[in-house]
Amino acid sequence: MKTLSMKSLLGGLMLLSAPALADSTTSIPAFEASITAAKSTTSPGGATILRSEIRNALDAFFNDAGYGVDSAERAYLTTRLNDTPFQQAMTGTAAKYFADFHEVNDTLVTGYPLNLYPVAQTPAVLFGATGSFSYARIYEGYIPNGQGVANQQTLGEAFSNAFGPQASIFEPITVRELIGQLSAYSYNVDEVEGAVAYITQISRNSNRLYRTGWSCRGCGAPGYTQGFAIAAVSTDRRFVRMISITTYAD
């Protein structure tokens, strides 16, 4: 059985359960090379760094020899975050992506206690329409007060504990990107708008939305399945609403 679209999401899922030391000696030069290219006059944004360009540059910290952002990489990113000329070279949305990336990737390799539980109502009721997302799985929960905030490791562990598969990296997204993601898999405008409203109900004041991809064999189907998940995080970074949608199954 095939569910929704056969489009592939992001290839090469990065496992969150086996942290290793990252390699700042390769990731930082790779990032700087991407920034130099992004600021060239022949780049899409000219001398201004676009959101797509900073996202591509920051991928260097996940494409190096190790896992995630280590302390040396974190220190470097903090310096760049406080570098006024560098920040001014980016568009507003690019600077927001950089800040969000810096916040969620805080080098911790043990997650905070975040237990997610299924919501009582169906997606059709919550979204106000039926369609491609009728079988979406929706969980939510919170980190006890004073016991941490939602970061990369916490989101990954919570997803795996709630939904089963391991997720790839949680990437910051905008509401526009959320609409685009959902619209690619549903042709019901009412369903998409309802889903967006329900998801952003949690993140509206914080603008903290994250997207990840997942794949699994034997998770909810006899064969291979894949899909994506969206996490919305509250202003205090304790409450999380997470939605997982299957896009392919055989």
Image: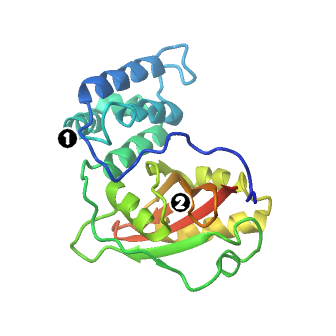
Q: Please name the residue shown 29% across and 64% down the image.
A: 149
Residue position marked by numbered label 1 in the rendering: 71
What crowding class fits label 2: few (fewer than 14 Cα within 10 Å), some (14-19), or many (20 or more)?
many
Q: Earlier in the sequence, mark 1 or mark 2?
A: 1
Q: Please name the residue shown 75% across and 74% down the image.
A: 129
Residue 230: give its label: 2
Instruction: State the image coordinates of residue 27 (x, y, percent, origin top left).
Output: 32, 28
Instruction: State the image coordinates of residue 103 (x, y, percent, origin top left).
Output: 32, 50
Q: Nearer the viewer, residue 28 or 37?
A: 28
| Location of residue 238 with respect to 182 vertically, above or below | below
Instruction: State the image coordinates of residue 120 (x, y, percent, origin top left).
Output: 56, 86
What crowding class fits label 1: few (fewer than 14 Cα within 10 Å), some (14-19), or many (20 or more)?
some
Residue type indicated by callout 1: Ser
Q: Please name the residue shown 64% across and 68% down the image.
A: 195
Direction from residue 10 to residue 49 in the image, left or right: left
Direction from residue 221 to residue 207 in the image, left or right: left
Instruction: State the image coordinates of residue 96 (x, y, percent, origin top left).
Output: 43, 45
Q: Residue furthest front?
A: 222
Q: Secondary structure at mark 1?
A: helix
Q: Secondary structure at mark 2?
A: strand
| Location of residue 136 with respect to 107 vertically, above or below | below
